[in-house]
Amino acid sequence: MELPAQIREAIVAHARYCYPEEACGLLAADADGRLRMAICMENADRSPTRYTLEPTEHFRALRYAEANGWELAGVFHSHTHSAAYPSPTDVGLAADPSWLYVIVSLGGLRNPDVRGYWIRDGRVVEEPLVPTAEVW
Amino acid sequence: MNMAVPVRIPTVLRPLAGGEKVVEASPGSLADVFAEIERRHPGLGERLRAEDGGLHPYVNVFVGDEDARYLDGLDTAVADGVEVSIIPAVAGG
């Protein structure tokens, strides 16, 4: 999966902004499945170890994505003090086998690591994220 | 004229809706809408209800632009042409 530069930057910036709490948001993809936007959202849990998307913001993001001919195709969140790999909580709560689950580990804020995963039936498979230039 | 109520289905539940993004129901209460969905798409309607019969905690339902939890829950009236949107709860750690 290609990860356009501005989407990676948006994810990392939102993770830094929310630190020390976890950051979260949704990923919109176009009809060809290409990632088009990271929609930064409030963490309703305001927690360093948990996140929940705020439902009204999620609904707004859905409307926005659909207005652009996109779909919500995944979710991202940050791990403030652990690796960019799904936690047992992430695996247990991952409901959508068609969604890409992106995790950014802040690595002391200076060396962010952004990785993507499919989580299906409790199994985690990494999807390599290939950096690409900015696209609009 | 009896317009249908469009019900937007999230990707995670589309396999239970024959792959459809939107299914249709008749106007009524939200409980009526869910019951009709369950009749047309067995297994789908019950994913929207908790075991105690209320709204499922892992599902957020919007009637028009409003969260049904802040309206009348399953008793919320859904008029002709008003859109119902099913938004899955998304969380992790």
Image (cartoon, coloured by chain):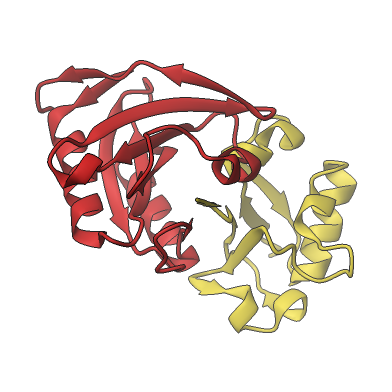
Chain colours: A red, B yellow
Along the horizontal axis of the image, is A23 left or right of B48?
left
Residue drawn at (38%, 25%) of the image: A31
> Which image quarter: residue A129?
top left
Q: Is residue A44 above or below residue B12?
A: below
Along the horizontal axis of the image, is B40 left or right of B69?
right
Residue drawn at (29%, 42%) of the image: A68
Image location (x, y in percent) of residue A63? 39, 54
Quadrant of the image containing the C terminus of chain A: top left
Along the horizontal axis of the image, is A134 left or right of A43?
left
Closer to us: B1 or B88? B88
Closer to us: A118 or B37? A118
Closer to us: A111 or B79? A111
Any part of residue A120 in sight: yes
Q: Is residue A2 above or below residue B48?
A: above
> Which image quarter: residue B71?
bottom right
Closer to us: A71 or A67? A71
Image location (x, y in percent) of residue A99? 50, 32
Image location (x, y in percent) of residue A60? 39, 60
